[in-house]
Structure formats: structure tokens, C-alpha cells
Image: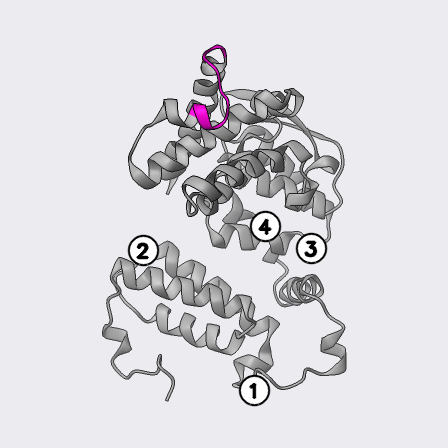
Amino acid sequence: MNQFNSPAKENIVLFPKTLDYYQIQLTVMLESERYGEAMELLRFLLQCQGQEERHYEEWQSLLDWLVAAFPHAAEGGDANEAPAAEEMDLGEEDMARILARAKLEEDADYPDKLLKRVMNEPLSEATVLALEQLSYLEGAGVDEALTGWLQRAEVHPLLQFRTLQTLRRRGAQGAVRLSRGHEAAEVEIETVPLQNDEFPAQIGQVLERVAEQAEVHEPTLYYFAQELWGQFIMSIYGTADYRKLLDGEDSQLDIWAGALHQMVSESLNGNRNEEETRGLYGITDSMRFQFEGAYRSLRGFVKSSLLDK
């Protein structure tokens, strides 16, 4: 009997640590393509009580997508059974495109519903999924709606960046003027990175510096630094901080690497050993002002992200 098929499951209230465990399990199932098990876990989670409404919405959206994209697994098929020849030729992007178009055939208002979710709900897995689905729906109306919204509304920087990626995937072109933090920025849609390796080399070089120090002093720090840096770069893309990072010399990369190390170390350990951190990255007294500026930028991003959750 499956571990999630308990007759009393509708009475289960998940504690935070239990919820975290199931979220990790769900991620592992998806990464290992155990879609049938993932669907069962999602159905189980949807029947548990006491969670925030946004969790239920995200789980339901993901379940709907899995059922439509992998009907064989939804019907209890053998996950190890060889797929049909036509299925083997379809990649993840092809499946997503087929799903989006099938949804459109069922509901002519589907693009509008996705747009409303993106524009009216906070950044979450559900809004990111809606943007991904919009990537595969044709029609200039979607481009105009997303571009206009970015230019007139106050949007979380990460959601801004995800929307710019969607516009690029849709083949939109031209510049978009938008407010990024406390400054105005102009971004060329065609140049927005879609993958980590599309960012300029300097972005990765900052992480390389942190990896060198973390390997010796705090091995677990690099994992968290990698996550924070990726999110932060998306949030400052196109801003003065971003341009300064790209235009600076090696010392500028050392400053950002040191500030990133300091920020993550404080979050993990609660200690503020700034002098020690600056020593690790060769940040002299003359560079201290710039180091503190980079640190404040990272801290401000972390603080705003926590407040938005």
C-alpha cells in the first residue's frame, strides 16, 4: 500500500519541519522523473490541513500540469516502462508547449487567466509556472500586456526578471524601461540571459572566489552563497550595481565575493567577523567603503525578499 494512501489523511496537520521534508521529497521525485509518485504526494498534501492558501494553489497547479503532461503516470503506469516512440522525441520544452496549447484549445481565456495570476499574485512557484506557460502561447497581446505592466507597475525585482525572460522566450524585441529598486533601468529584451552560462563571466568569477575560500573555511557556505548570488543577480540585472560589477577590475570581484561570503556567513552562524572576511579576499582599508556598499546591497535584497514572503 502506498505510504500516502491513509484513510485518515484528511485530518493530518503538517508541522513546518514535516512540510519541509515533503517539499524536499517532491523535488527529488521530480528530478528523478518519478512523476506518478509526485502526483500521489501532491494529492496527499492537498488533503492536509492548516497550510497557507498559496501552498495549496501551487500544489494544485503543479498537479494539474503533471497530470496533463504525463497522463500515463497519472493512470498508474509503470514509471520504468519504455515510452512510445513519439514520446521519446519530445523534450521538456516540447511537452510544455503542447500542454499550453491544449489548455488554450480548452479555454480561450487561458492567456488572460495566466496574466492575471502573474500580475496580481506575489512571486511564487505558481506565478513562475504561469510565466513559463505564457512563453508558449502565441499572440502579440501577451507581449503588450507584460511589457506595459512592467513599465507602469511596482513589481518585485525577481518577478520583473522572470517576466523579461518570458518576453525573450516569446521572441519579443526592443527595450523596456522599468523601475528596478530605487532607480530607472532600460533593458534590451534580446540580451536577457535565460541560463546561468549566458551571464557575463564576471558573475561566475565572484562565485569561484567564494568557492575557493569556502572549501577551506566553511564547506557548507558555498551552497547557500550560490543560491543567494543567483537570486541577487537577477534582482539587480540592468542596474548601476550590475554595470559596476561588470565594468570593475579584479578588485571589484573580490569586493563582491567578500560581501557575499560575509552575508551568508552571518546568516548561517550569526557572527560578524568582517575583518577576517576582508582579509580572506584581500580587501584593504581603501576598499572598505566599497565592500560595505556591496554588503548593504546584498543585505537589502535579503531583507526585502523576506518581507515579501
Q: How crowded is mark 3: few (under 14 residues within 10 Å), some or many (20 or more)?
A: some
Q: Nearer the viewer, mark 1 or mark 4?
A: 1
SS at mark 3 in the image: loop
Q: Which colour scheme is used?
A: one colour
State which quadrant residue 15 falls in: bottom left
Q: How far apart are labels 1 and 2 at the CA level?
A: 33 Å
Give the amino acid at mark 4. Leu
Give the amino acid at mark 3. Leu
Dot placed on the residue nearer the N-terminal end, 4 or 2: 2
Q: Do the residues labelled 3 and 4 touch (CB within 8 Å)?
A: no
**x%, y% of residue 170?**
72, 48
Q: How far apart are labels 3 and 2 at the CA level?
A: 30 Å
**x%, y% of residue 122?**
44, 44
- Residue 44 placement, left or right of 151: left
Which residue is labeled 1 in the image?
78
SS at mark 1 in the image: loop
- Residue 15 placement, left or right of 211: left
The magenta segment? 278-286
Q: Do the residues labelled 1 and 2 touch (CB within 8 Å)?
A: no
Which residue is labeled 4 in the image?
131
SS at mark 2 in the image: loop
Which residue is labeled 2 in the image?
52
Q: In the rendered structure, does residue 284 fall within the stretch colored magenta?
A: yes
